[in-house]
Image (spheres, grey):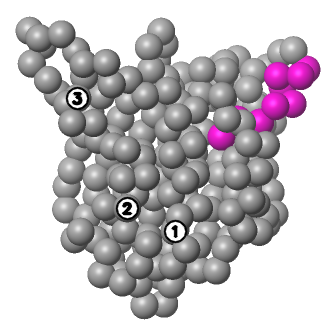
Amino acid sequence: MHDATTPAPSTAIAAQTMAKRWLAFADQARASRDFERARFWKAMELPPQQLSDSQYFEEEPGYQAFTQEFAGGKWAGIASFGDGDGQPGARFARLAFEHPDDRLDNAALDLAPVCGLDLDGFRKALLDAGYLEGPTAPSDAGYASKGTATVVFSRGPLQVSLVTQREAAQPQARRERACVVSAEARDFSESPSDAGSR
């Protein structure tokens, strides 16, 4: 984080922008060698050269994450990449939108701030990129209260899982609109390239 005594640089990233950049990575990852940390951060255009007070970057062995807190609310976008242990499916590239009240099973939570690109937008981008849509699995715990479900897409050894929730409890149009709160891509190649160290 930058020195609090200096003005914060204007580097805030909108939720929709983060979603579009994550989808660009999912499109560009055509082979196992493409599914690596440096390519992910390049596609995400992250982290910025200088972090503002609303941005955080963390790193530990095999894992990196960038967090953007969105202005005017408690929502945050978190982009992360995990190198895994070399086993198929262990490496992942994830984007999540989180709100502290969501953990409380708050059925009245409004997802509009992070729903600029909804499930239909994600679906179109993934299908246009050659992914095949699989089944939708309603959540046993959250479907009744928040419409929580998981939609799976696949292309070759890559699998994308989208966790969705309804935009709002009311009115009906917003209740029927599904927003993506988590997008995760995993590489299930049998012999992934050495991608974690670059």
Q: Position of residue 195 (x, y in %)?
A: 31, 75
Q: Which residues are magenta?
A: 172-180
Mark earlier in primary sequence (3, 1): 1
Mark earlier in primary sequence (1, 2): 1
Q: Quarter holding the C terminus? A: bottom left
| Relative side of 191 to 46, left or right | right
Q: Residue furthest toward the right?
A: 172
The residue tagged 2 is 39
* Residue placed most toward the observer, 11 or 92: 11
Q: Residues within 10 Å of mark 3 (few under 14, many from 20)?
A: some
The residue tagged 1 is 29
| Tag 3: amino acid | Leu
Q: Quadrant of residue 105?
A: top right
Q: Residue sitting at 51 percent across and 68 percent down?
A: 29
Q: Is residue 11 something that shows in the picture?
A: yes
The residue tagged 3 is 51
